[in-house]
Amino acid sequence: METQFTEQFKEFLRSETDPVLRRLREVAFAVFAGAGFPTVKDEDWKYTNVAPLVSGQWSVARSVGQSQVVPDRDIDLVKRFETARNGFAALNMAFAAFKVIRIAKDTSVPEPIELLFATDEQVAIFPHILVIAEAGSKAILIESYASTAKSFTNAAVQIIVEDNANLTHYRVQRESSEAFHVGTTEVSLGRGSLYDSTNINLGGALSRHDIDVKFTAEGGEAFVDGLYMVGGTQHADTHSIIDHTVPNCTSHQTYKGVLNDSARGVFNGKVFVRENAHGTDAQQSNKNLLLSNDARVDTKPQLEIFNDDVKCSHGATVGQLEEEELFYLLTRGLPDSLARNLLTYGFAEAIIRKIGIDSIRTSLDEAVLNRLNVKLEV
Amino acid sequence: MLLEVKDLHAGIDGKEILKGLNLQVRKGEVHAIMGPNGSGKSTLSKVLAGHPSYEVISGEVLYEGKNLLDLEPDERAREGVFMAFQYPVEVPGVSNSQFLRLAYNQKMLHHGLEELDPLEFNDYLKEKAKVVDMDPQFFKRSVNEGFSGGEKKRNEILQMAVLEPKLAILDETDSGLDIDALRIVAEGVNTLRSPDNAIILVTHYQRLLNFIVPDMVHVLANGRIVKEGGKDLALELEEKGYDWVKGAASSK
């Protein structure tokens, strides 16, 4: 299929000198050309129509010069990326700007590792980050998106947390409300490892985040939490898969949504507990607050269990603020709108507070308070 | 007269719970409303505070001579009506001091008085915290979050101290408190008791009234006040049990 990316890809490929990566890109682009962008006919994209993105004019950020040469030993890891998951993943791999971050064995990185992505009006970027937290290491990764115009970000992050490593991951998407944002996070967890992620989605005209977490050895633990808070005509979609393929792993997932005006949210969370994954403890919840009659959320928590010896729970709620909570604030003399906004802030803050970096947490708190028109001075 | 409840009929979900209740409260008085479970105590508190789920079927509630039932719950609060909750709500992300300053300033604004900035308010709050012997550490913590039962109740009394209501309704404030917490809460209430305000204690047990001595005791049964008297009535009730007044209710 000819698209606006076909010519751009030919040109882009000229600057790729590494034969292995060149081949990888070509194959990926062929996958994209064959599949095209997903449509609402695809089950996984039923509620997210990417037509406005597809019809936009995008120029790909120039040259693979921005891309790091992937060390030979990491090529196989890059190849693990599920290029065929959808057209966006394939397109990412074709134009990928690679960056490899390797946290050395038994090292504790004192300062957080910060990645910040932003692009210009009508420019598309395709960051592809590979993070390897080697055995026994400990680090904090901050991944932020902050484009200020009608731009297109299509990002992929592959994370490998090796045995007994500990990775805290904050993903903060605060793109412009005109921007298009598609991101894929693939996480693989080793024996006794800990992966704690907090995914904040405030921006984008249309945003989609796929996060897949797979336990590959016993004793792993994962927190996959998130908040989407959107208004106006924003659309925020999260699809997650937590895959318990091995015994005795624990996963916790709490996603919250706040939807105002005619904004729309989508949460689709699958938890798989495979046949031999005995001793699994998996918890999942998705709670949504609708602040307006025109706001909408489609939530689908799914638990698929193929083993009896497990502890699992899941649930989703969609609703308004609790009447009792609202009443409490009213009886303290707070006007109705202020009372509602404070409670909404509290609802969202319960996720934001997980972020252990003061400057980021404070800035997110402020962003949420601003949206709710609340002034809280200390 | 601060509060005058006249032949009040009210209920919830189409069920009438208060069936003709009369009550008069003057400034400077402490009234205890006692009664068995299901007698309507809690309904009375909630109707006075303006809970939206409760409906008033008939009757009148005058507060400072004006129709209280016309006011929204937040307006009642700013006019000086306060209710301490049996189960205070947690407000994550909002510190106690931020919350109290918001509430305090809303009241000031309403009365055309000057609002306090965070520094001024902090001094004011420190002073008030002495009433319930509360550690200033609690100011920074999110409202009621992770508070023990006793701490939550103390926090309710701190809110009362800060907002200086004319009419305070304490809804089962004694429930779930150990004797030390009860003493602190009661001492707080006694400190706040003044000729300019009135307090309604809603309670199932006489225990609280050992610490906060009421001017009047009203016994509620089946949605009506079936017995009224001085502080000794509570003791008599403790001795004879609620079956004593239940009998009175049915013979009326």
Image (cartoon, grey):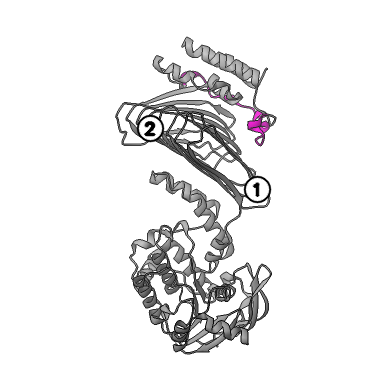
Residue A371 pos. (x, y %): 55, 51
On the image, numbered disc 2 is attached to which residue?
A193
Q: Is residue A332 above or below residue A22?
A: below
Residue A160 x/y as whole percent: 42, 27
The type of residue carrying mark 2 is Ser
Please tell me which residue is depicted at 37% across the width and 32% down the height of the picture. Answer: A192
Residue B103 covered by magenta stretch: no
Q: Quadrant of the C terminus of chain A?
A: bottom left
Q: Is residue B82 above or below residue A292?
A: below
Asked if labels 1 and 2 share a chain, the reply is yes
Specify the subunit that label 1 lies on: A
Element type at marker 1?
Answer: loop
Q: Earlier in the sequence, mark 1 or mark 2?
A: 2
Residue A63 magenta: yes
Residue A69 visible, this angle: no
Give the number of the disc on residue A295.
1
On the question of residue A92 being in view, the answer is: yes
Q: Quadrant of residue B72?
A: bottom right
Q: What segment is highlighted magenta in the picture?
A: A42-65
